[in-house]
Image (cartoon, rainbow, N blue to C red):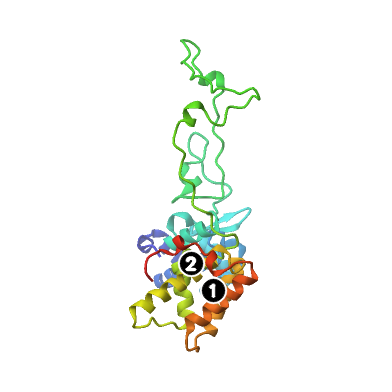
Amino acid sequence: MKRTALDNPKIDALCHALNVQRWGAIGILESLWHFTAKHAVQGDIGRWSDRDLARFVGWTRGDSRLIAGLLATKWLDSDPIHRLLVHDWAEHCDQSVRKTLVNRGLAFAVPNTPFRNGSGTLPSSRIEKNGLPCLAEAEAEPVPSLAEAEPSTGPRPAQPPAAPVSASGLPPLVSDSDSKRPAAPPAPPAPAAGLVSHMPSTADGIARVLQVQAGYRPPVDRVQKAADRTTWRKIGQAVMAGFLGPPIDAYPAAKFQAAECMHADNRTAQFVAWAKRRMAENGHEWTDIPQHQTQEAAL
């Protein structure tokens, strides 16, 4: 609950309407807002029946009396489409509600008979609140015609020269000046098709996951440790490049096989043997893995 709500005179009015103590009115409102945040995040609480709302807040003295009291004291708004709306929900809800709406691509619900200002248009605060649109549309502002937008007198501003047009009627793809410029560096290769969202984006990342699955522990010998690091990194690169099959299939298969190698005497050698067999089944060899792509940071 907003701290300012505790001093709102409408709480006293709700106490009088429902014949409850102040702490009871505050509890009803707090429960109602928690219910809205969880089950009617847009503020359209009217999707639930009066009985459901009364049961949630613990009210046992007549469902209609509770709703009538909340409407009379302006804690709820009546609406011809949504039935009931939490009054000014877009202004008083917490940040978690706004984040939920953004994540779900939803908007605040507002009364379908909103107030209007003196000009007959909706105030901007009713159209967008806290960066989120509301479910009410403002009247479209008149768009000036071209005759009104352009000056009636005076010289027209100079227009920029038109782009050269080829015989086909289309502008040339490359101009003479562009042909003299040095060629742009080639774009990096696109990731292999079928990458799953949970797969690491680098060969080192895949290697780390596979090492953990296999229970790999680096040897004490520095030479052997460096050799193992290069081997695991090459396996990660082979998975990314699709040498073991489509990455969406090869990555989980590699994780499963790494776990199978956990109890082997030489986990690295056993896993490499499996990787080579899998590469051969897909028409690749161990030497096909580009060496320059394995020169990455140490694991």
Q: In the image, is 7 to the left or to the right of 273?
A: left
Q: Nearer the viewer, residue 284 or 2?
A: 284
> Where 81 sits versus 177, above or below?
below
Categorize mark 2 by other alpha carbons within 10 Å: few (<14), some (14-19), many (20+).
some
Q: Nearer the viewer, residue 42 or 266?
A: 266
> What amino acid is labelled 1 in the image?
Phe
The label on residue 268 is none
Which residue is found at the position 51% from the left and 41% from the top?
122
Residue 126 in picture, x, y percent from top left: 49, 46
Q: In the rendered picture of this protein, how many numbered marks are placed on residues?
A: 2
Alpha-carbon span between mark 2 and mark 1 = 45 Å
Q: Nearer the viewer, residue 267 or 8?
A: 267
> According to the image, label 2 marks what residue?
200
Q: Nearer the viewer, residue 130 or 252?
A: 252
Which residue is found at the position 52% from the left and 84% from the top?
261
> What amino acid is labelled 2 in the image?
Pro
Residue 75 in picture, x, y percent from top left: 48, 60
Pick whichever of labels 2 and 1 is earlier in the sequence: 1
Residue 277 in picture, x, y percent from top left: 60, 75
Which quadrant does the N terminus fall into?
bottom left
Which residue is found at the position 55% from the left and 41% from the top?
138
Residue 203 in picture, x, y percent from top left: 47, 66
Confirm whether residue 181 shows in the render: yes
Q: Quadrant of residue 196?
A: bottom right
Which quadrant does the C terminus fall into?
bottom left
Local secondary structure at mark 2: loop
> According to the image, label 1 marks what residue?
56
Which one is in front in this view, the residue at disc 2 or the one at disc 1? 2
Confirm whether residue 28 shows in the render: no
Which residue is found at the position 47% from the left and 58% from the top?
98
Q: In the image, is 171 to the left or to the right of 33?
A: right
